[in-house]
Image (spheres, grey):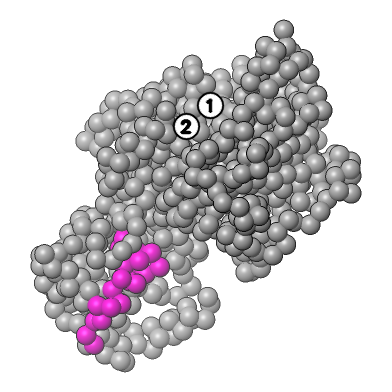
Amino acid sequence: MASGVKPRVKVPKTAAAGEAVVIKTLISHEMESGQRKDKEGKVIPRSIINRFTCDFNGQNVIDVTLEPAISTNPYFQFEATVPETGEFVFTWHDDDGSVYEDKQSITVG
Amino acid sequence: MRNPLTLAAVLAALCGSAALADGTVAPGDVKYEDGAVAVSLTGTPGDPANGPAVIDRKGGNCIACHQISAVNLPFPGEIGPPLDGAGSRWTEAELRGIVANAKMMFPDSMMPSFYKTEGYIRPGVAYTSKPPEGPLDPLLSAQQIEDVVAFLMTLKD
Amino acid sequence: MKRLHMALLAALVSASPVLADEEAELVINGDLHIVTRAPAAPHLEGHLDEVISGWVFRSDETQALQMDDFDNPGMVFVDRAMEVWNTVDGSEGKSCASCHNDPAESMKGIRAVYPKWVESAKEVRGIPAQVNDCRENRMGAKPWKYEGNEMAEMEALITLQSRGMTVDVAIDGPAQSTWERGKEIYYTRYGQLELSCANCHENNFGNMIRADHLSQGQINGFPAYRLKNTKLNTVHDRFKGCVRDTRGVPFKPGGAEFTALELYVASRGNGLMIEGPSVRN
Amino acid sequence: MTFTRRETLALGLGAAALSVLPIHARAATWDELIAEFTGGAAMADTGITLTAPEIAENGNTVPIDVAAPGATAIMVLATGNPTPPVATFNFGPLAASQAASTRIRLAKTQDLIAIAKLADGSFAKAQATVKVTIGGCGG
């Protein structure tokens, strides 16, 4: 299910130095749990995003291990400290080896 | 899934609309009097111990619409009246009639008819969205109805 | 604060399984005020006094998901449809944008008046039929399945451009016979459970069917992101599911019967506002 | 942008080299998972909050919040799910708070457990019961 995956990220455009900003992320993904069966009764193989990270200018904000109990279209909200102008990098790691990435700049002024 | 259906079709064909070989009253032969059914559908007394299973989601799903304190099922519905004390308010014949076909007593009732196989508009096979290839089974068997009626008779005020 | 409020309410009203705050007001993104209760249209006299959005019947948590476009999981699929809008498809080398430019301009108000009589086609049509008409006859592209994700997502993009506008479908003139047919379907008891739309959504809205809080079955929030299947659902998807749950055989999505029913049900929401893409259970 | 398989493969190459087997190769019970996370240490019942609805309208999407000021990691377990692990949040130096929200699946009515590993190496635990509703329609 690595096609049509689409991330959304909400980060403020600007912040004061050292300010805590709220970040929200959502990515479209089935999060196939490996628990469900198809119509023939065969188990549908697990296919989930197993890790999500957010870094800012090379420093880590949050690094999450996801399990099949995370809902379809995984959503996270958390807070980051923004010491200076820079770029947030978000990554989502798929069971199939794919890594989806999004970047958002923020200006401290 | 195909086999039980075929079997039911064969049974129905063999038996026509008359009483089934084992003495069970077929859905089309049930006699309603003011909505009540005096005669047992099976001739075998109902077993109230089977009542809770019939009431649950995999059975007749009565709990979707009725509160029944005696069965410990979470989130009972409130579409129909609570069934606590049903055995004090109704006779066995009335309860049998209501479960088998509530519309005989209450023409506008939303309650499904649990012992009926004809007269439907666009009926499907259970929740498959597929039209039936032969006669439909009633929602509950005759014995399930006797069992749930016996159970309801134990719910006294 | 919302959580705390809920816990307090839960303690007070323990009989009600899922607590909808029926006095809550729907404000999206802090500034878009949505009318969720309105006087019923004249044609509903004797049936309903007030029409109520399905949002009102949902739990606090589900309600909250629709109050912020980032928290609403349906919006990621609107983003996806926007890419499709701008992508050339079919033999004519056109995208939706080739003719319709920015949907914020060209599609504004469309959802509030659909389904409607389309003179060129001599029939009442919902938005999906119009989308497929464009795809086949203008773009030279393959039509989408009525139940596929592409259709639900494109309808959501189009719907979003009317969000906050008042539902106002026409039920008279050339649409009247279709509307009458839809009304007949609404009151027909289908399937082995012999249930009509009205049994649950006119006579029992506000009541619990097991843990489901029955709404009026309004469709002003469609396409809806349902928690049940975690995707956008069109109105016809929902109709199909409901008829299946009567142990019945649904009509064909995109077909004449469900389009008639869609017009009729939409007309029961005249006076409410377009909310789609909404979030529902 | 929307990722296609081809685009993401290139991105994923680096990660593929590092990719490891799922951490819990066998289905561990929730108390085994706690023992693994804490090394058997005692857990305080303050210092962490777990917020979840008392009743979840749909078990497919249950919003939860966890917060443990000063924590380096918070593990969330669903004791009644077929596989209890839900997520582990590891907080980096730029986390402004040791708190996060997400949406989870609960197979049935059950207890959720969140355990924080605090900066001093101690642990704290919070628990919440979530009732998961049952639909009315039989299908």
Identify whether C70 is placed above or below D87.
above
One can see residue C238 in this view:
no
Could you tell me the amino acid type at mark 1?
Answer: Asp
Quarter of the rendering occupied by the N terminus of chain C: top left
Proximity of marks 2 and 1: CB atoms separated by less than 8 Å: yes
Q: Which mark is residue A74?
A: none
**Which quarter of the picture shows residue B23?**
bottom left
Query: What residue is at 78 percent from the left and 28 percent from the top?
Result: A59
- At 25% from the left edge and 62% from the top edge, which residue is drawn? B68
Give the chain of mark 2. Answer: C
Please, is residue C89 above or below residue B38 in the view? above
Q: Residue C79's x, y, as percent?
A: 67, 30
In this rendered view, identify the residue nearer to me: A43 or C107: A43
| Image location (x, y in percent) of residue B96 | 19, 73
Residue A50 point in image, percent of width and height: 72, 48
Q: Nearer the viewer, residue C89 or A20?
A: A20
Q: Which residue is mark 1?
A: C68
Q: Which residues are magenta?
A: B44-63
